Image (cartoon, grey):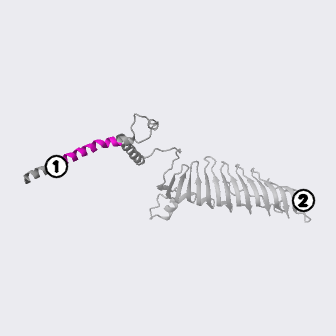
C-alpha cells in the first residue's frame, strides 16, 4: 500500500517562490478565486484559491504521475477527494490535514481493495478487505493498519469467525463450511505453553503464525429426497398382528357356519320350493328319534314295575 510520501506531499507555495500563476486575485494581489499554477518543482494545480492558498475544489498533478482531485483547506487535502498513485492504486474517500481519515475505499495495484474506516492515514476501525486473486475477504476490525479484533474471514466454500491480532487469527473461533459443518477450536501459538521465555525470544515468537487446534466438529446434515420409507420390522409386526387376528376370527366363523345349517333365505326358499323342508320341519325331524326312544324306555319301566307287583302278590298268598 502506498504510504504518505513525496507523491502525496504538495509543493508549498511560499510567497518567496510561487512559480507561475494564471488566475484570479483579490484586492491585496493574493491568489484568490479560480486559477492555474505551475510550481517550481514542476507540479501543477488547477483549482480554487483563498488568500493565496489552495482552498476549495481543485486538481493537483505531481511530476511522478500521481494526481489528486478533491477538496483543499489551507493548502492541505481536506474533505472528499480521490488520489491516483503512480503504481496504479487509488484512494477515494475522506481526508483530514493531508491524511486518509474517515471513510474511504482503497484499490491496490494488485487488484485488492479495502473499504472502511481510516484513522491518521491507516486502516483503523471496521472495514472489508477483498483479495482479488482468491476472492476471499476479511470483514471486521482493524488496528493501526493491521487486522485486529472480532472479524470474519470468508473463503470460497467456508469462512472463519473469531478474533484477530496483528493480522493473524488468535484465540477461540470456528470454521463454518457451506455444507453445514462447523469446526470449533482455538488458534494457539506453537510456544504458548512455554512460560520461561526471554523478552527477545517472545518478540521473535510474535512473528510465528499461530496454529489451529480443533476441539469440536458438528455432524454434517445431508439433504435427501422426500420419499415414502418402508415400515420398520417392529412397525410391520405390530401392523400384521391385528390382520392375523382378524383372519383367524373370520376362519373360525366360516367353520361354524359350515357345521350349522344356514338360516339364510335363498332364492329357492323364497319361491316356496316343495323339495326343500322348512327350518321347523328340519328341527322336528332331528328331535323325533329321541322322543321315540324315551317312550320305549318309559313303557319298559312300566312293564317291569307291573311284573314286580304281580310277584309280590303271589308271595303274599
Residue segment shown in magenta:
283-305
Asked if residue 85 is among those painted magenta in the image, a careful observer would answer no
Q: Residue at x 33, y 40 (%)?
A: 285
Q: Residue at left 10%, top 50%?
A: 311
Residue behind mark 1: 306
Q: Nearer the viewer, residue 302 or 30?
A: 302
Using the rendered view, name the quadrant where residue 114 is placed. bottom right
The residue singled out by tag 2 in the image is: 24
Taking the magenta stretch, the answer to whether it contains residue 285 is: yes
Q: Residue at x 7, y 52 (%)?
A: 315
Q: Secondary structure at mark 2?
A: strand
Of callouts 1 and 2, which one flags the residue occurring earlier in the amino acid sequence?
2
Q: In this picture, is 30 found above or below 271?
A: below
**Disc sitting over residue 269 in the figure:** none
| Residue 84 in the image: above or below residue 268 | below
Which label sits in the foreground, 1 or 2? 1
Q: Is residue 277 visible?
A: yes
On the image, the x and y values in percent for residue 40 come to 81, 55
- What is the CA distance from the residue labelled 1 to the residue labelled 2? 172 Å
Disc 2: CA contacts within 10 A as few (<14), some (14-19) or many (>=20): some
Q: x, y percentage for residue 248? A: 37, 44
Q: Determine the secondary structure under disc 1.
A: helix
Kindly identify the residue that appears in the image at 81 percent across and 56 percent down: 58
The image quarter in which residue 94 lies: bottom right
Amino acid at each position: 500500500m502506498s504510504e504518505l510520501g513525496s507523491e502525496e506531499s504538495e509543493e508549498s507555495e511560499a510567497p518567496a517562490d510561487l512559480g507561475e500563476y494564471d488566475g484570479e486575485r483579490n484586492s491585496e494581489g493574493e491568489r484568490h478565486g479560480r486559477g492555474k499554477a505551475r510550481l517550481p518543482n514542476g507540479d501543477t494545480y488547477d483549482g480554487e484559491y483563498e488568500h493565496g492558498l489552495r482552498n476549495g475544489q481543485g486538481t493537483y498533478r505531481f511530476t511522478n504521475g500521481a494526481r489528486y482531485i478533491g477538496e483543499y483547506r489551507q493548502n492541505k487535502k481536506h474533505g472528499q477527494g480521490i488520489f491516483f498513485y503512480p503504481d496504479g492504486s487509488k484512494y477515494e474517500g475522506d481526508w483530514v490535514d493531508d491524511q486518509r481519515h474517515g471513510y474511504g475505499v482503497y484499490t491496490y495495484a494488485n487488484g485488492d481493495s479495502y473499504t472502511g474506516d481510516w484513522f491518521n492515514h491507516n486502516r483503523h476501525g471496521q472495514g472489508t478487505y477483498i483479495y482479488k486473486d482468491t476472492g476471499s475477504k476479511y470483514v471486521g476490525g482493524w488496528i493501526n493498519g493491521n487486522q485486529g479484533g472480532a472479524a470474519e474471514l470468508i473463503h470460497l466454500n467456508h469462512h472463519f469467525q473469531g478474533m484477530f491480532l496483528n493480522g493473524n487469527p488468535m484465540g477461540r473461533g470456528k470454521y463454518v463450511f457451506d455444507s453445514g459443518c462447523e469446526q470449533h477450536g482455538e488458534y494457539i501459538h506453537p510456544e504458548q505453553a512455554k512460560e520461561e521465555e526471554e523478552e527477545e525470544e517472545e518478540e521473535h515468537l510474535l512473528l510465528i503464525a499461530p496454529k489451529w487446534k480443533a476441539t469440536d466438529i458438528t455432524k454434517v446434515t445431508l439433504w435427501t429426497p422426500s420419499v415414502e420409507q418402508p415400515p420398520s420390522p417392529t412397525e410391520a409386526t405390530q401392523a400384521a398382528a391385528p390382520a392375523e387376528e382378524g383372519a383367524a376370527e373370520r376362519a373360525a366363523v366360516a367353520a361354524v357356519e359350515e357345521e350349522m345349517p344356514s338360516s339364510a333365505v335363498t332364492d329357492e326358499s323364497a319361491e316356496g320350493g316343495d323339495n326343500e323342508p322348512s327350518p321347523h320341519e328340519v328341527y322336528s325331524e332331528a328331535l323325533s328319534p329321541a322322543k321315540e326312544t324315551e317312550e320305549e324306555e318309559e313303557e319298559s319301566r312300566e312293564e317291569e314295575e307291573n311284573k314286580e307287583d304281580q310277584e309280590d302278590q303271589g308271595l303274599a298268598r
